[in-house]
Image (cartoon, rainbow, N blue to C red):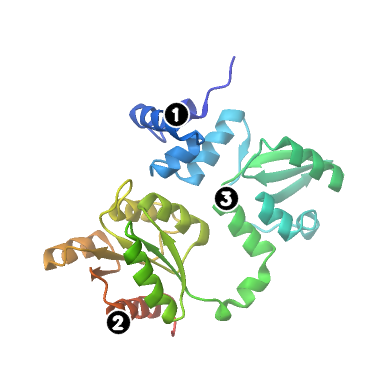
Amino acid sequence: MPRKKLGETLVEMGIIDQTSLDKALEQQQNSGKRLGQVLEDLGLLLEEDIARALAKQFGFRYAKGLSRFSFPQEVLDLCDAETALTKSIFPLKIEGSTLHLAMVDPLDIDFQNDFSFKIGLNISPCVSSPEEIKAAIKKHYLVEIEADEEDRLWSILVVDDQDIVLSAAEAALKKEGYDVYKAENGAEGLKKAMQIRPHLIITDVLMPRMDGQEMFRALKANTSVADIPVIALSAKAAAEEEYRLLEMGFYDFIPKPINPIRLAARVRRAMRMTHGAHS
């Protein structure tokens, strides 16, 4: 029996519907991208969804919550931090002559063969998402990062489809000493938020592809980033708009055009109230 395609698996699992799949397939033909990437760009899919679907499609085990568990040092010593980060892998356990290895790309047979030869063990791949593996690597390999947390820059992700707004916000926030990341739409913002887990997100409300409100709902639905405070930007400065967004759950509201002094003050307050930051 032939293996189902990724799109069919996603529909079967209820992650997307057939209409969304047809839309993505049509766009894929014109873009040359992988289907998973197109679905991510459209804001229809998260990295975790791809990992789950890949596991089901090829019959791999799905590994989740890696950063919550402890692993024997002898297992961790099989892989150095640089290899783990570069290849997006994480060693899970040894059973007999086999290493169970969490991978973002379990179909990378060449790497598995090379790594198997290097460590003298067979490889049994499991599928995990990039954010899961990064969190596990940070906890178990990059301990010095946690120990040096006080010296780490406070990070902010700014999401807006206008370059002038992104540049103005970046300039104002960097002047205050923040580490600033930028995204041009909600889909890209959601992906970056999952990857870097910023201390604060500032997003425009109205954007093409995935707007700020859709991104906000997606963030709150994912436990790994649900606690990140989100400040809304809107060109609608009316009190009714501010009330509506605050009722949705946004931490704060800043009207456009951005005033650098107001932006810095609101961000400083959000950092102090949610993280205890003194900037």
Disc 1 and disc 3 in contact, CB within 8 angstroms: no
**Residue ID for mark 3:** 130
Residue 73 screen position, x and y as percent: 78, 60
Q: Is residue 68 visible?
A: no
Residue 107 screen position, x and y as percent: 66, 35
Q: Secondary structure at mark 2?
A: helix
Q: Residue at x 66, y 46 (%)?
A: 102
Which of the 4 image quarters holds residue 258? bottom left
Which dot, 2 or 3, sits closer to the camera?
A: 2
**Residue ID for mark 2:** 261
**Dot 2 alpha-carbon crowd within 10 angstroms: few under 14, some 14 to 19, many 20 or more:** few
Q: Secondary structure at mark 1?
A: helix
Alpha-carbon span between mark 1 and mark 3: 26 Å
Q: Quadrant of the N terminus?
A: top right
Three-letter code for the amino acid on which mark 2 is drawn:
Ile
Sequence-first tag of 2 and 3: 3
Q: Work out whether 27 lies above or below 42.
A: above
Instruction: Give the left or right position of residue 145, taking residue 251 as reference.
Output: right
Residue 163 screen position, x and y as percent: 35, 61
